[in-house]
Image (cartoon, coloured by chain):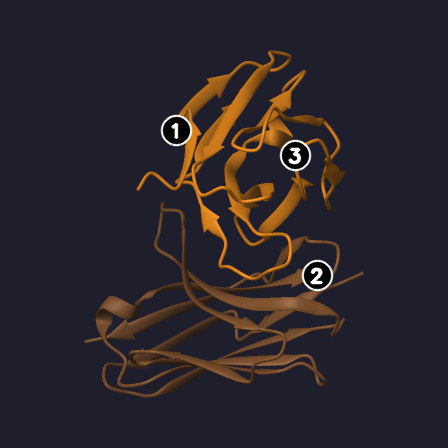
Chain colours: A orange, B brown
Amino acid sequence: NAGVTQTPKFQVLKTGQSMTLQCAQDMNHNSMYWYRQDPGMGLRLIYYSASEGTTDKGEVPNGYNVSRLNKREFSLRLESAAPSQTSVYFCASSEVTGATEAFFGQGTRLTVV
Amino acid sequence: KQEVTQIPAALSVPEGENLVLNCSFTDSAIYNLQWFRQDPGKGLTSLLLIQSSQREQTSGRLNASLDKSSGRSTLYIAASQPGDSATYLCAVTDQGGKLIFGQGTELSVKP
């Protein structure tokens, strides 16, 4: 019963470095999401994928890219990290029709110095 | 553009009180509405999901209602306990499949 697995759990980057956050779900969900959570800002949608092979921008996509590698995996890439991208990142999955609840990973705490 | 608002932003109550958390959304074209709980430093845990055709859902001491036409939902917590202290978030799934969150209500239940 793994649910949604995110790696890594913690990461410190220097400004300008790149990295990829990995997310995998084992519930056969069609939809996957990447959010960032900052104090006082709630969860803001970065990108989402309604189904394998499709991705769409959310509220705050600038500075990020995503890949829906297959139905299970959805990765988030920071090409050139900036201090403003210091945040907690969450991956989630659900069914696009909203017929089931959404499940979340435990988060990745990223610090860019 | 769908916007989700939660009121109040923070709430402190003594143990044993019944309480209501509010959530409103601007576009009634939704698939569902969900309530989540988040403990400090942790991920989100789903509490209740209400499909767009439903009016309410219950789980133990929790009851969530949905009035889609007015764009409102409430989460009722009966007989609150210190262990209920957490941040509660509501989210709607819009017709495009996006899951959009409110900013949450931080609940503190005092012993």
Mark 1 or 2, closer to the camera: 2
Q: Check the residue under mark 3 and report the chain it is in.
A: A
Q: Amino acid at mark 2?
A: Asp
Res A112 seen here: no
* Badge 1 element: loop
| Residue at x 63% of width, y 74% of height | B52
* B53 lies above or below B30: below
* B15 lies above or below B29: below
Q: Is residue A105 left or right of residue B99?
A: left
Q: Check the residue under mark 2 and report the chain it is in.
A: B
| Residue B103 percent coordinates (x, y) | 57, 61
Q: Which residue is mark 1?
A: A9
| Residue A75 percent coordinates (x, y) | 58, 26
| Residue A56 percent coordinates (x, y) | 75, 39
Give the numbered dot on residue A52. 3
Few, some or many C-alpha atoms within 10 Å of disc 1 (few <14, some 14-19, many ≥20)? some
C-alpha distance separating marks 1 and 3? 25 Å
Q: Are marks 3 and 2 on the same chain?
A: no
Q: Are marks 1 and 2 on the same chain?
A: no
Q: Which residue is mark 2?
A: B94
Residue placed most toward the observer, A6 or B23: A6
Residue placed most toward the observer, A15 or B64: B64
Few, some or many C-alpha atoms within 10 Å of disc 3 (few <14, some 14-19, many ≥20)? some
Residue A55: which quarter of the image?
top right
